[in-house]
Amino acid sequence: MINKIFATAQTALADVPDGATVMISGFGGAGMPSELIDGLIAQGATDLTVVNNNAGNGDSGLAALIAAGRVRKILCSFPRQVDSWHFDRLYRAGKLELELVPQGTLAERIRAAGAGVGGFFTPTAFGTRLAEGKETRNIDGRDYVLEYPIHADYALIKADRADRWGNLVYRKTARNFAPVMAAAARCTVVQVRETVELGALDPESIVTPGIFVQRVVRLTPMRKAA
Amino acid sequence: MNKFDRKQMAARVAQDIPEGAYVNLGIGLPTLVADYLPKGREIILHSENGVLGIGPRPAKGEEDADLINAGKEPVTLLTGGAFFHHADSFGMIRGRHLDFCVLGAFQVSAAGDLANWHTGAPEAIPAVGGAMDLAVGAKQVLVMMEHLTREGQSKLVERCSYPLTAARCVNRVYTDLAVIDVTPEGFCVIEMVEGLDLETLQRLSGVPLKYQPAARAA
């Protein structure tokens, strides 16, 4: 019997090694698997490369992982925010490497990895400093930049509900990067609010089929002010 | 000198968004445009983080941390709205499905080049978000910005001195002084704030302006 449901974040994250590339879902706080990240901090893996849209907000979630000194490099589109102080401090101190990627290119590079695509040409960033040194091509009169997929060892994502096969549904804009990250990682670990019986999720409404998911943990989010 | 305030600028942009349009409003000043869309028009607002059909701000106490816009502010969903993942959301943008995006800017050049993500200052932490995708992807790129910097420099320029977001992408610029189209011949003023004359606007603008009040290209 397939059962991808793990009892605790500790067991679901036990094998994350130092130096791993870890995708973390979320756009700001929406969809960020904060309790899984707490589990990763407790687990102790370090020297991580993290892929997320941002570089942490406030003191919890990804910001806590950064503050704990576990992140060597971050790939994101929008690190600088009013409450990204942990990133700002370590970046300015030269202790955190940044690869800045336009948001749509970030999403598509992750999607490409999950879809087995070896690269793609995008018009985004052509002629800008974010395309410097990159291969370009003119296709049917339009200029494009060659971008490569981003693969990950682990994806830590958040969904609303899951069954034991790992089928997922999300909640509102908390979906954001999770479906593409689930497909791009060798091992996808999902934090959910609720686990349900097989068959309880409408097959027409499943957003991420379980083939992209290896581990599910039910974790109750700590309610915070928005 | 008369100036449009932020609300008047937003209301002016809103006038140009037609019935049935799919629109992305950038973070900051452009977000204000939502409040001034004419009530009779059905207009669908898109946000990069995976939502079409954004409604008004929620009432106090009704905010949902899972329902936000690209500025990470709480929003509501209109009946008929939809959620989707980030790659699909940017497919809508890059794939030319959005009719309009409205963006802020540091500089716009006479060729329609846009600089809005980086001032070029070496100590600044760079952040780009979805700006480059929106600038190359939307069918019409509208820019909202003050006409002058705080130091009195024109933000309409011959060539952008700040790093580019995208080349040749801007269609129309709304400032606190004027509405200006980007044409193959350069900037063309189509409206000015009441009491302002072209000579004064030209003196403030540091780049040649044509004047054609009838032009309504966007």
Image (tube, coloured by chain):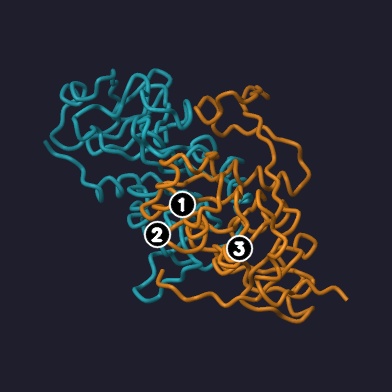
Chain colours: A orange, B cyan
Give the residue displayed 54% in from the left and 66% down from the top.
A34
Q: Secondary structure at mark 2?
A: loop
Give the residue displayed 77% in from the left and 75% down from the top.
A164
Mark 2 or mark 1, which is nearer the start of the sequence? 1
Name the side, left or right, on which A126 lies relative to B197.
Answer: right
For the question of whether residue B110 can be seen, the reply is yes
Residue that label 2 marks: B40
Residue that label 3 marks: A40
Identify the amino acid type marked 3. Leu
**Foreground of the two, B60 or A28:** A28
Name the side, left or right, on which B116 lies relative to A140.
Answer: left
Chain on which label 1 sits: B
Quarter location, residue A124:
top right
Identify the amino acid type marked 1. Glu
For the N terminus of chain B, the quadrant is top left
Look at discs 3 and 1 and give the one toward the viewer.
Answer: 3
Where in the figure is residue A84, as x and y percent of width and height? 41, 52
Mark 2 and mark 3 in contact (Cβ < 8 Å)?
no
Where in the figure is residue B171, as x and y percent of width and height? 42, 32
Q: Are marks 1 and 2 on the same chain?
A: yes
Mark 2 and mark 1 in contact (Cβ < 8 Å)?
yes
Give the residue displayed 43% in from the left and 32% down from the top.
B170
Residue that label 1 marks: B19
